[in-house]
Amino acid sequence: MRLARLAPYLQVAPLTVVFLLFLAVPILTIVMVSFWDYDTVRIIPDFVLTNYQELLFSPVTWATYGQTVLFAAITWVITLLVGFPVAYFLAFHVRSATWQTVLFLVCTIPFWTSNVIRMISWIPFLGRNGLLNSALLELRVIDQPLEFLLFSDFAVVLAYVHLYALFMVVPIFNSMMRIDRSLIEAARDAGGSGFQILRSVIIPLCKPGIAIGSIFVVTIVMGDFVTVRLMSGGQSASVGLMMMNAMSLLQYPAAAANAVVLLILVLLTVAAMMRVVDVRKEL
Amino acid sequence: MTKTTRTGFNRRRLLKGAGAVAGAAIGSGAITGFPTLWAQNIKNVTLRQFGTGVSAINEIAAKCKEDLGFTLQMTALDSDAVVQRAVTQPKSYDIADIEYWMCKKVFPANILQAMDIKKIKNFDKIVPIFTTGKLKSDSVIAQGTAPHSVSFVEGKDSAKFSKTPTDWYTMIPTIYNADTLGIRPDLVGRPIANWKDILDPAFKGKTSILNIPSIGIMDAAMICESAGIVKYGDKGNMTKEEIDKTIAFLIDTKKSGQFRAFWKTFDESVNLMASGEVIIQSMWSPAVTAVRSKGIPCVYQPLKEGYRAWGGGLALAKHLSGIELDAAYEYVNWYLSGWVGAFLNRQGYYSAVLDTAKANMSEDEWGYWMEGKPAKGEIKNPQGKVMEKPGAVRDGGAFADRMGAVACWNAVMDEDRYMVQKWNQFIAA
């Protein structure tokens, strides 16, 4: 009857409410505030385009977005190159389920501490008088400390890879575990070499996992500000850092405009990935 | 049962009585000392103070409880968050412990109330930097947001700053100091005398300045002016053209690899210096102390062009009234009465009323911290840890030499918005 027709709506209601309250409303607020005006202490409800004009016509914005996208791209490539083999090893080379679980847990060990601590730990290791430089100097491999190790783009990417490689490993491992082993046997029976199996069977079937991992890594890196600030020693910028600077001077509308632009960029990136791979197959 | 009712009644009566007495006392201006309110009920008051970490000191809250009976709840935030919270959540605090440049931004938002100087017992003894602006009658007022320029408002409920002293005082000064460059004397290998020395090619990749736009730009300005790159009308309130030139110079310097890092927090600056990543950088005085306490030599180097000074104060929230407002006045009067002043002076900062602080310090302590004399005995910090051995002399010397050589106060500029955009450009470059 009527109740029966209503039932599905009632069933989705809780989730809808949660999404509206905690996702849709905040985002709409940000969009709204991005059109407001501001002075040194107040934000003034208004409809002005100055926030977007100042943002989009500034070479700083383009340089910063370029830098952020570059960080995301490099991190993506490296985490994929690291994550895929790790997942492959776990899924296909480790035969016993117990060992698979154990090794998988080993992968998560770094996540037992906060990501800020994981990041900061690199600083005494990479510094001018840090462990690595001291060791290399002692071994007479180098005669001057390597300055590029810390407070550089190298350090930033290193920290990103360290922090986020697992986000690539997990979904890929998950996809691999779902591959029907008989498909691989069939490929082998049909005379496929290891590399051919990898290329024509495993990789295509892992695509959803790769896509999900990529979405994790790319979106996290694009929104980051702590890693860039700490590991570059404030020498590099990221979009997140730009927003931080604006917010610290109460320039919320400017930060909101920047957030909207970043959101659009990230959504476009994710949409592009979804076009290449049908992630829903995974779910 | 009856007993409970009675207690309730008594307390209420007491409250009423105390309120009347306090009201009468305030009305007649007959407040002469503390504590003015003897009533039990002030013990139930809790004042929520929030501000920058420098002055949120637990010992002060504990001593306040001991001396005045009421509870002081302190929250420490970084300076950006302090400004935000002061303006956006005025109901969330009773006392704002903010810096003078923040006051210039925050007070006009009309969320703080000015204090009646007649109720501030030691008002006449406050260091004149915070009233007339001149340390001595012949002093030149420094550039930037000089504290006296934001210390008075036109009337009781006004949020408009008055250029000349009035009866309505915005902030009771808490801590102030003169900042300069910190150096590692063992690693720089030559005498450092000017701000421009940070540009010495010998220090390439071993220098740092702070990445807090409003303060970093001032240090940058001190450097640029010292090196003869830019001549400023007012370093604390630059024109767009001055900002452009300063940032352009910073970008060139950054691209040439002069800087190792830009720090944002206290501990970052300590670590940069202690690890030897950096040997000359902008620094805050407790950071220098922290480096030194690790047994690593570090000097807070006085420079020829003078210091960049900063100061903070206590401001009362607009919503305070009645007994809470009375308690707040009690608190600020107590703050100036000497114990706190001595405590702060022993940390290497300066306090607002020197006479009362002096009475709470030993002659040797006063000589070392305030007069630039060599220490006769061991100099200890407020927690009793030995800071300096006999014979040590404070970097920069006496109070008058340091606070008398202020070139510029931390400031907020009219072109703030533009400056931040340019600063972002510098960091992104």
Image (spheres, helix red, strand yellow):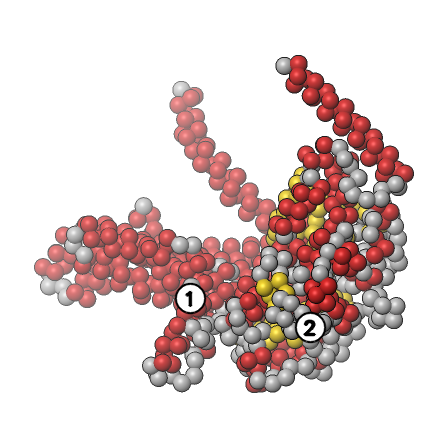
The chain letter under disc 1 is A
Which class describes the residues within 10 Å of circle 1: few (<14), some (14-19), or many (20+)? some
Q: Locate residue B60, reporting x and y percent.
A: 66, 50
Residue that mark 1 sits on:
A122
Q: Quadrant of the N terminus of chain B?
A: top right
Which kind of residue does numbered mark 1 sit on? Trp
- Residue B115's spot in the image, x, y percent? 81, 47
**Residue A56 bears which disc, if any?**
none
The kind of residue on which mark 2 rests is Pro
Residue for point 71% across, 52% down: B339
Residue at the image position 39 percent from the left and 72 percent from the top? A131
Task: Return the residue at label 2.
Answer: B374
Q: In this view, does A151 lie to the left or right of B216?
A: left
Pick the residue in front: A220 or B383. B383
In this rendering, position of residue A175 left or right of residue B358: left
The answer to whether marks 1 and 2 sit on the same chain is no
- Please name whichever residue, B377 or B422, is drawn nearer the observer in this view of the structure: B377
Which residue is at a point 50% across and 69% down the rendered structure image? A232
User: Which residue shows up at 19% across the image and 66% down it?
Assistant: A195
- Report the front residue among A54 and A40: A40
Asked if the residue under mark 2 is in contact with the one under mark 1, i.e. CB atoms within 8 Å, the reply is no
Q: Position of residue B384 (x, y in %)?
A: 60, 58
